Image (tube, rainbow, N blue to C red):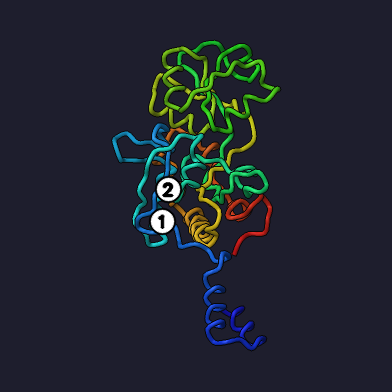
């Protein structure tokens, strides 16, 4: 409106044209679309990852991802969002198709996912990290082959699933002695491990501890961590920076509160060792560096 007012003072134009200028300025393509945050916000989450994001019954979801996004929405005054299931490979697509407004599904914040479409990216904004984790391995509890290092997995079959940073990591030439089996989802990999069709499952350690607590015959290999840290964020399609900043600011408050983050983490992932839990908790500086920006290290959005 201010821009239109200046134009009207600089130029002598008919009243009808001036009105049109005001309308175009107020409704032009630069304005942000309506808020995606409401009592009816739809959130895509994993349905097969106990501890992080899980649906044990039709329509019911629990886990740390669910607790985080639910608490942030409640802190903003909204009802708990509606959840639906998503595969890793479809997370960005659901957002761009408008099927959901947010994704909270152990979704790692990466430069490619953050970058605008014209830079070859997935054109997503993230709020996070709300947790960070390295990758690890899940094996049978009775596996006595003394797996302690990556070299101990040479020639063995490790299951991963499509659309994950774990699958990308094990595809690197430095890990080409490990045989990878790629499936569509986590549940298929875990079932293959339980049936001893594969030697291990690899993904983020926090996810693996969730599988361990749900499957007493499986265990996470202690101390065997690799890859770059995976920083989990709540994703949305770009174009909603005001909503992104609102969620970012309540995430900082949620992490800052004495018990909120720790309580939800411990309730969701009680098998995670204290050292790993402490490493998983983000700082406010980390949240500012990765939230609502096109690339890591950009100036934070207001």
The image quadrant that residue 279 belongs to is: top right
In this rendering, does residue 98 appear at all?
A: yes
Secondary element under disc 2, as helix, strand or loop, is loop
Choose the circle earlier in sequence order: 2 or 1. 1
Residue 146 spot, x, y in % from top left: 57, 13
Q: How many marks?
A: 2
> Within 10 Å of the Cα at label 1, are there few (<14), some (14-19), or many (20+) other Cα atoms?
many
181 sits left or right of 151 in the view: left
- The quadrant of the image that shows the N terminus is bottom right
Q: Label 2, label 1: how many angstroms apart (C-alpha)? A: 15 Å
The vertical placement of 166 against 113, above or below, is above
Between 179 and 100, the one nearer to me in the picture: 100
User: For the residues carrying marks 2 and 1, which lies nearer the camera in this image?
Assistant: 2
Residue matched to label 2: 100
User: For the point 54% across and 32% down, which residue is it?
Assistant: 163
The vertical placement of 220 against 233, above or below, is above
The vertical placement of 162 against 44, above or below, is above
Residue matched to label 1: 73
């Amino acid at each position: 409106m201010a821009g239109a007012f200046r134009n009207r003072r600089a130029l002598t134009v008919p009243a009808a044209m001036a009105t049109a200028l005001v309308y175009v300025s107020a409704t032009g393509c630069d304005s942000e679309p309506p808020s995606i945050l409401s009592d009816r916000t739809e959130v895509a989450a994993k349905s097969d990852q106990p501890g992080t994001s899980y649906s044990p019954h039709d329509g019911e979801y629990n886990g740390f991802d669910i607790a985080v996004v639910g608490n942030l929405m409640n802190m903003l005054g909204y009802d708990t969002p509606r959840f639906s299931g998503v595969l890793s490979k479809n997370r960005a697509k659901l957002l761009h198709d408008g099927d959901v407004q947010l994704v909270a599904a152990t979704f790692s914040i990466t430069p490619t996912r953050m970058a605008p479409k014209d830079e070859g990216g997935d054109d997503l904004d993230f709020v996070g990290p709300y947790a960070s984790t390295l990758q690890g391995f899940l094996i049978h509890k009775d596996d006595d082959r003394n797996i302690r290092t990556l070299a101990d997995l040479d020639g063995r079959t490790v299951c991963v699933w499509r659309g994950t940073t774990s699958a990308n990591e094990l595809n690197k030439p430095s890990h080409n002695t490990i045989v990878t089996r790629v499936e569509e989802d986590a549940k298929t990999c875990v079932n293959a491990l339980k049936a001893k069709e594969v030697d291990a499952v690899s993904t983020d350690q926090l996810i693996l501890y969730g599988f361990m607590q749900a499957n007493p015959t499986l265990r996470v290999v202690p101390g065997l961590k690799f890859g770059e840290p995976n920083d989990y964020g709540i994703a949305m399609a770009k174009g909603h920076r005001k909503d992104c900043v609102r969620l970012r600011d309540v995430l900082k408050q949620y992490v800052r509160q004495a018990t909120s983050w720790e309580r939800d983490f411990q309730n969701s992932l009680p098998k995670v060792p204290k050292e790993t839990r402490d490493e998983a908790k983000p700082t406010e500086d980390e949240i500012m560096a990765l939230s609502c920006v096109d690339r890591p290290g950009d100036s934070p959005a207001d």
